[in-house]
Image (tube, rainbow, N blue to C red):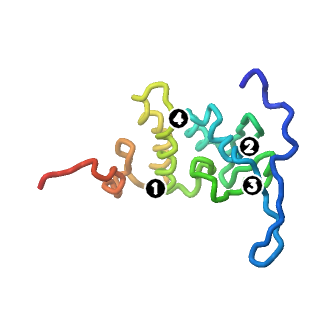
Amino acid sequence: NGSVGCFFDRQTSWICQIRGVSDGKDTLFDCVPKFYHSSLREAPLASRGWTIQERFLSRRTLHFTDREIFWECDEKIASETFPKQVPLWNQATEEDLPLPKCPLTHGVWFSLIEKYSRCKLTFARDRLVAISGLARIFHARIDDDYVAGLWKRDLESQLPRGAIELDE
């Protein structure tokens, strides 16, 4: 928050290592606290819809969390603890992963919409308007027509199951 800023005393390292055996070889495993992956997801701005568009449109993004700084680009997400790349492991959930950016595909669109749908908007009626900036970019790249939050190609597969029942 604004009362502390980004320069504060930090834990020297969230990582501890344990030695184990993997595939018959001695291996060092990085161990981090449970909160590590969720600290980015639970940051106050992460719950706002406009930040999805900002993250996607920006080539690089800095995230100031209450524990450390993360940085994200088109290829990876890194942090003070993991400056080369934040490792992805089984306990990480989809929300913890970097925002997919390349290549622009229908799958990337659906991932963005899923994240965006969980976010808060000041006015719920702005939902389709707010995502339209991303839709314009996708329209130019994936050669498909955008129709009220869905893509014309394979329209049926994008509708929730059981949402429409037609009498024959």
Ranked by sequence position, the earlier of labels 3 and 4 is: 4
Q: Nearer the viewer, mark 4 or mark 1?
A: 4
The numbered dot on residue 140 is: none
As shown in the figure, which amino acid type bears the numbered disc 1?
His
Quadrant that contains the C terminus: bottom left
Quadrant that contains the N terminus: top right
Ranked by sequence position, the earlier of labels 3 and 1 is: 3
Residue on which disc 1 sits: 106
As shown in the figure, which amino acid type bears the numbered disc 4?
Gly
Q: CA distance from mark 3 to mark 1?
A: 26 Å
Q: List the single residue furthest toward the top.
A: 3
Mark 1 Cα shell of 10 Å, populated few (<14), some (14-19), many (≥20): some
Residue on which disc 2 sits: 70
Kindly identify the residue that appears in the image at 47 percent across and 38 percent down. 131
The numbered dot on residue 85 is: 3
In the depicted view, which residue is nearer to us: 97 or 10? Answer: 10
Residue on which disc 4 sits: 49
Q: Are marks 3 and 4 in contact (CB under 8 Å)?
A: no
Q: Position of residue 54 (x, y in %)?
A: 59, 37
Residue 116 appears left or right of 17: left
Kindly identify the residue that appears in the image at 53 percent across and 55 percent down. 104
Q: Nearer the viewer, mark 3 or mark 1?
A: 3
Residue 118 appears left or right of 89: left
